[in-house]
Image (cartoon, rainbow, N blue to C red):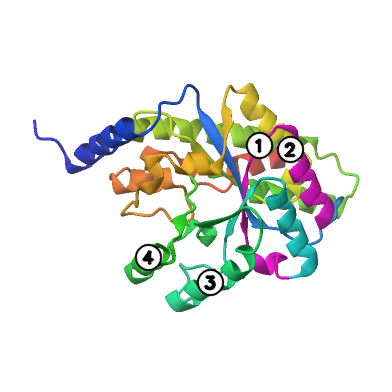
């Protein structure tokens, strides 16, 4: 029976990764955060308090993370730059996430404009302790045309950048929006249901992406987790890290995770706004149904469950 091209490619990728990657004794995860430091006002905690709470949670668990800096959200001002510097001084990596967070999939954003955003952000981040020449695409979107996608891939190679891929994507931002909405309406609101929904969401995504990695690669890969520099993580990052430990996962560093050969792959069919694993699946011809709808929603399941509770 002839072997389909998709099946042959899947087998080849798995064989390469098994040959080159160190065998992990347990599933591992690296913590990364986007859009920080964010100086926007939120209920309960000031920007400085949010930043300090996240760093305290990471220090408590001895986690070395990475902050992908969106310079226009705060690092372009002295008070925000100080918050970013605190990450580097705390032993965390600092990397590039543009200045104004434009969407490369937008017809209004040109390749040249996007590349300039990377260069302008680099001038700020490169001077900070912990700087790594990693770039993460905003919205995890590599462009709405082949010209943009291929142009950015060539640009990153020329500039010496690593693509700051995400494998374990989450919708923490959606649940954060819900949290802020509740507290704006009632500063004394009981937010425990949101905490429980958030932890359940992280657990579901972690298990689903682990299963997808095993399906596509034939092994556990070191997962790169995407979270954001926001209120929900300032309040409950400690719980998120502890949950992974309780699940039996080990915490690795982003640099150690990116050393795995899976993060050298450049899937032909990107899944806009989604993880590397979903893009790999799309490249192998898997459908949305095959990959799993709950990996592609924006926390809709958890938001609907909160609505059923009257929230």
The numbered disc on residue 272 is: none
Q: Which residue is mark 3?
A: 119
Q: Taking 262 as reference, is 177 above or below it?
A: below
Residue numbers of the magenta segment: 47-76
Residue shown at the point (49%, 52%) measured from the top left? 164
Q: Secondary structure at mark 4?
A: helix
Residue shown at the point (46%, 44%) measured from the top left? 258
- Does the CB distance between marks 2 and 3 fall below 8 Å? no
Picture quadrant where residue 59 is located: top right
**Residue 13: horizontal and vertical position, in percent?**
28, 38
Q: Which residue is mark 2?
A: 59
The mark lying in front, picked from 2 and 4, is: 2
Q: Earlier in the sequence, mark 2 or mark 4?
A: 2
Q: Which residue is mark 1?
A: 63
Q: Earlier in the sequence, mark 2 or mark 3?
A: 2
Q: Secondary structure at mark 2?
A: helix
Q: Taking 270 as reference, is 286 above or below it?
A: above
Q: Hey, which residue is sitting farthest left in the picture?
A: 1
Q: Which residue is mark 4?
A: 149
Q: How far apart are labels 2 and 4 at the CA level?
A: 37 Å
């Amino acid at each position: 029976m002839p072997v389909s091209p998709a099946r042959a490619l899947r087998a080849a990728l798995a064989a390469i990764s098994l040959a080159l990657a160190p065998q992990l004794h347990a599933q591992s995860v690296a913590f990364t955060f986007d859009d920080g430091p964010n100086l926007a006002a939120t209920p309960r905690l000031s920007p400085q308090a949010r930043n300090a709470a996240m760093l305290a949670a990471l220090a408590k668990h001895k986690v070395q993370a990475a902050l992908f800096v969106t310079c226009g959200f705060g690092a372009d001002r002295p008070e925000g730059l100080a918050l970013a510097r605190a990450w580097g001084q705390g032993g965390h990596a600092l990397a590039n996430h543009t200045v104004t967070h434009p969407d490369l999939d937008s017809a209004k954003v040109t390749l040249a404009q996007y590349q300039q955003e990377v260069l302008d952000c680099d001038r700020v981040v490169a001077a900070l302790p912990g700087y790594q020449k990693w770039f993460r695409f905003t919205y995890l979107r590599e462009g709405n045309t082949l010209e943009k996608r291929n142009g950015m891939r060539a640009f990153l190679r020329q500039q010496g950048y690593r693509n700051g891929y995400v494998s374990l994507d989450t919708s923490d931002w959606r649940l954060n929006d819900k949290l802020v909405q509740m507290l704006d309406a009632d500063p004394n609101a009981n937010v425990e249901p949101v905490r429980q929904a958030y932890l359940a969401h992280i657990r579901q995504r972690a298990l689903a992406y682990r299963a997808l990695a095993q399906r596509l690669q034939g092994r556990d890969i070191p997962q790169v987790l995407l979270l954001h520099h926001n209120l929900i993580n300032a309040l409950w990052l400690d719980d998120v890290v502890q949950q992974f430990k309780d699940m039996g996962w080990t915490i690795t560093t982003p640099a150690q995770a990116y050393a795995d050969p899976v993060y050298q792959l450049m899937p032909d069919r990107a899944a806009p706004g989604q993880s590397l694993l979903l893009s790999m699946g799309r490249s192998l011809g898997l459908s949305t149904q095959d990959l799993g709808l709950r990996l592609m929603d924006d926390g809709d399941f958890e938001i609907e469950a909160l609505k059923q509770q009257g929230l």
